[in-house]
Image: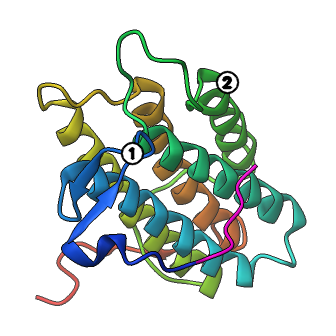
Amino acid sequence: MVVLNRIYTKTGDDGTTALGTGERRPKYDLRIEAYGTVDETNAAIGVVRLHTQAVPELDAMLGRIQNDLFDLGADLAVPEREGKAERLRVVASQVERLERDIDMLNDQLAPLTSFVLPGGTPAAAYLHVARTICRRAERVMVELAARPGEPVNAAGIHYMNRLSDFLFVASRTANGNGAGDVLWVPGQNR
């Protein structure tokens, strides 16, 4: 259980922040950037959910995803180290659940005949914003994982990769199962 009885601590006033291990890092550190961008993805999904109350099944999926993203933030905040007790980690079953949700939503959609532009309903537009933030979080996580001594849980990277796919399919769902998609017309404005 987490107990927060004081919100400000002043410990970050020197430009550093603590990982879950207690280790202090500069606020511009790539690990901080990774879990900060995961948090940004979560916040964008919170905005999406203002517009999905009329679609309870999609809203419930997004609620589960928000919880998973907190798990991922905790995962990133406590790097895996040899000989250390296992902490909260994103696991393969969370990725698999996303895949099932993608398949279920996608089964209701007509095949695409063009790329989709962000837009349509407010929910769809915000889902595209969340998708692009998610892609950025994934890129930061992959860059972090490529650095020596910076372990990143592979399941977390897989999760973010699937999440961006989910958010795309969910945007089409929010656009009347694709009927309201805004399609790209190549060279339209030449």
- Name which residue type carries label 1: Gly
The residue pinned by badge 2 equals 93
Q: What residue is shown at x 55% (from left), y 30% (from top)?
A: 89
* Label 2 vs label 1, nearer the camera: 1
Queried whether the magenta region covers residue 2, the answer comes back as: yes
| Segment tinted magenta in the rendering | 1-6
Do the numbered discs 2 and 1 sit on residues whose CB atoms are within 8 Å? Answer: no
Number of marks in the image?
2
Disc 1 secondary structure class: loop
**Which is more toward the observer, 34 or 175?**
34
- Please, what is the dominant secondary structure of the magenta stretch? loop
**Way the structure is coloured:** rainbow
Residue 108 visible: yes
Question: In the rendered image, which quarter is residue 92 located in?
Answer: top right
The residue pinned by badge 1 equals 22
Q: Residues within 10 Å of mark 2 (few under 14, many from 20)?
A: few
Disc 2 secondary structure class: helix
Q: What residue is shown at x 71% (from left), y 76% (from top)?
A: 49
Residue 87 picture location, percent across and down: 56, 28
The reply, left or right, for residue 135 in relation to residue 100 is left
Residue 68 picture location, percent across and down: 64, 46
Earlier residue among tags 2 and 1? 1
Question: In the rendered image, which quarter is residue 55 located in?
Answer: bottom right
